[in-house]
Amino acid sequence: MTAMPGIRVSGRTARPVLVSLAPRIGMEIRGVDLAKPLDEASFAAIRSALFEHCIILFRGQNLSEEDQVGFASRLGELGRVLHQHKGASKHHPGVMFISNIRENGELIGALPDGEMHFHSDQCYTERPTAVSMLYAMEIPSRGGNTLFANMYAAYAALPAELKQSLEGRQALNVYDYDNSPTLRAAVNENAPRAAHPVVRTHPASGRKALYVNRLMTEAILGMPRAESDALLGRLFDHIENPAWIYEHVWRPGDLLAWDNRCSTHARTDFDAAERRLMRRCVVLGEIPQ
C-alpha cells in the first residue's frame, strides 16, 4: 500500500492510501467519500493516479446521480449519451444506465446482457471519450465482471520493429450499435466511424499507448485487407495478454473510473435472469494524436 498526500474531505484531512489492483494496472483509493467535497489538491492527486495507473477504484460509495456527475465533471466536459433511446437518464444528458432490468416490458438500460469484447469507449467518434466512470447499483451473484488492459504496457512490450512499422499509421474504428453492440461482427456500412492513430500519445502523461481494440477497430488504413486483418489480429491478442489485465469483480457501491486513452475494457458473461444495474457517465476527450 502507498500513502497519498493528505486529502481534505469536508474540512478534515483524511489519510487515504493507494492499493494496487494488479501488477501492471489499476489502483484502489481507500479513505475517500466521493459524496463529500474534495479540495483541488486532493482532486489533483486522484486525477494523477488515474492518468498514471489507467483505472482507479473507490469501494463502498453511496452516490446520487448528481454526486457522480459532479465528480466526473471536474475531470472535464461531460460527454452526452450518443444513443438517446438506449438507457439515457431523464435528469442529465451525460448519464446512461447499463442494465438488463425491464419495466413494463421495456429495458431501462443499454447493453443489457452477455459478454462484451475489448473496446475503448466512443473511439468511433472524432473526439472519443477520455474517461468513463461506472457506478455499481445492482449486480448479479457472479459474472458481469469488467476486464481492463493497460495499453501503455501493451505498447511498451511490442518488438522495436513493430513499433516502428506502426508509427504514423491510422486505424478505422466502427461501431454498429444496432446490430453488434457487444461482439465483433460484420458491420453496417452506415455505422458511425472515425480514423485515429494506431499508437496515440496521452496528453497528460506524455506516454504512448496502443489505440486499437477487438470490438471496434475495423482496419488499418493504407494497408491491404489481408495484411491489415493479420496485423490487427496479432495486436488484439497482444493487447489481451493477462500480464497487463485486471479483472474487476463488482460489488454494489463500487465507483470505477478508467482512462480510455491508455486502457481497453471488456465484460464477461452473466446470468441474464439476474438483475444488473450500473450508472455511467463519460468525460469528452480530445482528437487523438
Image (tube, rainbow, N blue to C red):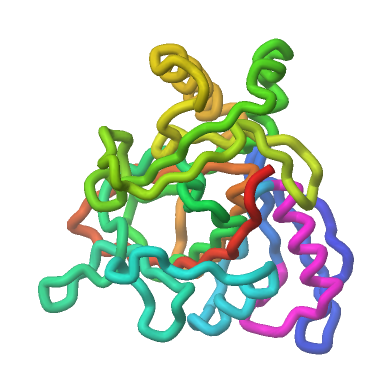
Toward the bottom, the furthest residue is 11
- Please tell me whether residue 203 is drawn above or below residue 89 in the rendered image: above
Q: Position of residue 206 (x, y in %)?
A: 80, 43
Q: Toward which corner of the image does residue 102 lie, by quadrant?
A: bottom left
Toward the left, the furthest residue is 105
Closer to the camera in the image, 264 or 194? 194
Q: Position of residue 8 (x, y in %)?
A: 83, 79
Horizontally, residue 5 falls left or right of residue 25, namely right
Give the overall secondary structure of the magenta segment: helix
Closer to the camera in the image, 104 or 212? 212
- Please tell me whether residue 210 is drawn above or below residue 166 in the rendered image: below
Horizontally, residue 285 falls left or right of residue 7, namely left
Which residue range is magenta in the image? 31-53
The residue under the point 62% across, 82% down is: 35
Q: Position of residue 194 (x, y in %)?
A: 48, 44
Q: Is residue 247 visible?
A: no
The residue under the point 18% across, 57% down is: 273
Q: Is residue 191 visible?
A: yes
Q: Position of residue 288 (x, y in %)?
A: 64, 46
- Please tell me whether residue 98 is drawn above or below residue 262 in the rendered image: below
Horizontally, residue 252 falls left or right of residue 48, namely left
Residue 51 forms part of the magenta stretch: yes
Q: Toward which corner of the image does residue 59 lie, by quadrant?
A: bottom right
Residue 15 forms part of the magenta stretch: no
The residue under the point 69% across, 19% down is: 163
